[in-house]
Image (cartoon, rainbow, N blue to C red):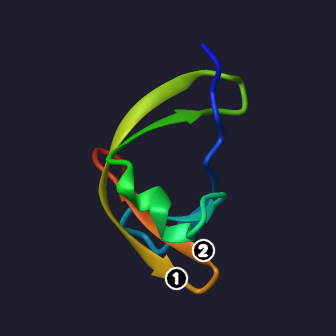
Amino acid sequence: MEWIELGRIRRPFGVKGWLHVESFTDPLEALLDYRKWTLRSASGARATHLVAEGRSQGRGLLLRLEGLE
């Protein structure tokens, strides 16, 4: 299976599980249309998470995933 990278998680935002996300989609907000995300760690392991909520912030996105705080 071939994977396409649509964005990258950059760093945490606050203390309630929000994350800064760099989107590679056009427009940037289109990344939030995907409810289920498969994340790949630096080791290559993959895990699927559901998007709880997200919004635009400057030139990027803020996102909170279900089950991660």
Q: Secondary structure at mark 2?
A: strand
Q: Is residue 31 left or right of residue 5?
A: left
Mark number, residue 39: none
What residue is shown with label 2? Answer: 60
In the image, residue 33 above or below residue 49: below
Q: Secondary structure at mark 1?
A: strand
Quadrant holding the C terminus = bottom left
Kind of residue sitting beneath label 1: Gln
Q: 10 or 26: nearer the eye? A: 26
Q: Residues within 10 Å of mark 1 (few under 14, many from 20)?
A: few
* Residue at 41%, 31% in the rendered image: 48
Identity of the residue furthest to the right in this view: 42
In the image, residue 44 above or below residue 9: above
Q: 20 or 3: nearer the eye? A: 3
* Residue at 28%, 48% in the rendered image: 66
Q: Assess whether mark 1 and mark 2 are in contact (beta carbons under 8 angstroms).
A: yes
In the image, residue 57 above or below residue 35: below
Residue 14: x and y in percent read 47, 75
What residue is shown with label 1? Answer: 57
Residue 53: x and y in percent read 30, 64
Residue 23: x and y in percent read 61, 61
* Residue at 42%, 70% in the rendered image: 15
Q: 57 or 65: nearer the eye? A: 57
Kind of residue sitting beneath label 2: Gly
Between marks 2 and 1, how big is the CA–CA gap? 5 Å
Quadrant holding the N terminus = top right
